Amino acid sequence: MHIGERIKAVRQEFGISQKVFGEGIGIADSYVSEIESGKKTPSLTILLAIAFKYGVSLDWLKSGKGEKYIKEATYLTNKEIQILKTLRNKKELHAFVVLLIEKFKDKKEIVKRLTEFLKSL
């Protein structure tokens, strides 16, 4: 199962359309369709948004290994979704995001640090 199929499985388990799923993470339904079909590969920012918004394990999304859902789901607020949208548009922040993910396993701490960093820009 490729990453797009895993994302599709999550969306279907929530019983939502590609449009609603995409709106939840800040992307167009047409892009969701391309990801699910394997035509596009989601960025780390999109994977983070899915992980946070839907309580899915980032490791499972990327590799298909481990538990699909994290035990205590951390759902994104609208403000946190805006932060992720901002990150997607600032490629120079990619390395910073990767470092945060490697250093902090607690998703709330990652969002907190990202928020602090973006406020300093």
Image (spheres, rainbow, N blue to C red):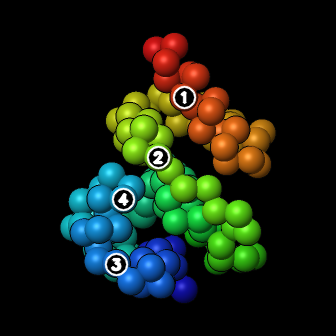
- Check disc 1 and report its element: helix, strand or loop: helix
Q: Earlier in the sequence, mark 4 or mark 3?
A: 3
Kindly identify the amino acid type of the residue bearing the numbered disc 4: Gly
Q: Which residue is mark 3?
A: 16
- Check disc 2 and report its element: helix, strand or loop: loop
Can you give x and y, in whole percent of width and height, for residue 33 in the image? 28, 74
Foreground of the two, 9 or 74? 74
Indicate the quadrant where residue 27 lies.
bottom left
Residue at the spot x=49%, y=23% of the render?
118
Q: Which residue is mark 2?
A: 77
**Mark 3 → mark 1, Cα distance in angstroms:** 29 Å
Relative height, residue 77 to residue 70 (above, below): above
**Mark 4 → mark 3, Cα distance in angstroms:** 10 Å
Can you give x and y, in whole percent of width and height, for residue 87 in the image? 44, 36
Residues at badges 4 and 3 in contact (C-beta under 8 Å)?
A: yes
Residue at the spot x=51%, y=13% of the render?
120
Indicate the quadrant where residue 29 lies.
bottom left
Q: Which residue is mark 1?
A: 115
Kindly identify the amino acid type of the residue bearing the numbered disc 2: Thr
Q: Which residue is mark 4?
A: 24
Q: Give the class, few, some or many, for how many residues have Cα within 10 Å of label 3's Cα (few <14, many ≥20).
A: few
Q: Earlier in the sequence, mark 4 or mark 1?
A: 4
**Mark 4 → mark 1, Cα distance in angstroms:** 19 Å
Kindly identify the amino acid type of the residue bearing the numbered disc 1: Thr
Residue at the spot x=54%, y=86% of the render?
1
Q: Earlier in the sequence, mark 4 or mark 2?
A: 4
Can you give x and y, in whole percent of width and height, for residue 81 in the image? 42, 45
Viewed as shown, does residue 63 lie left or right of 93? Answer: right
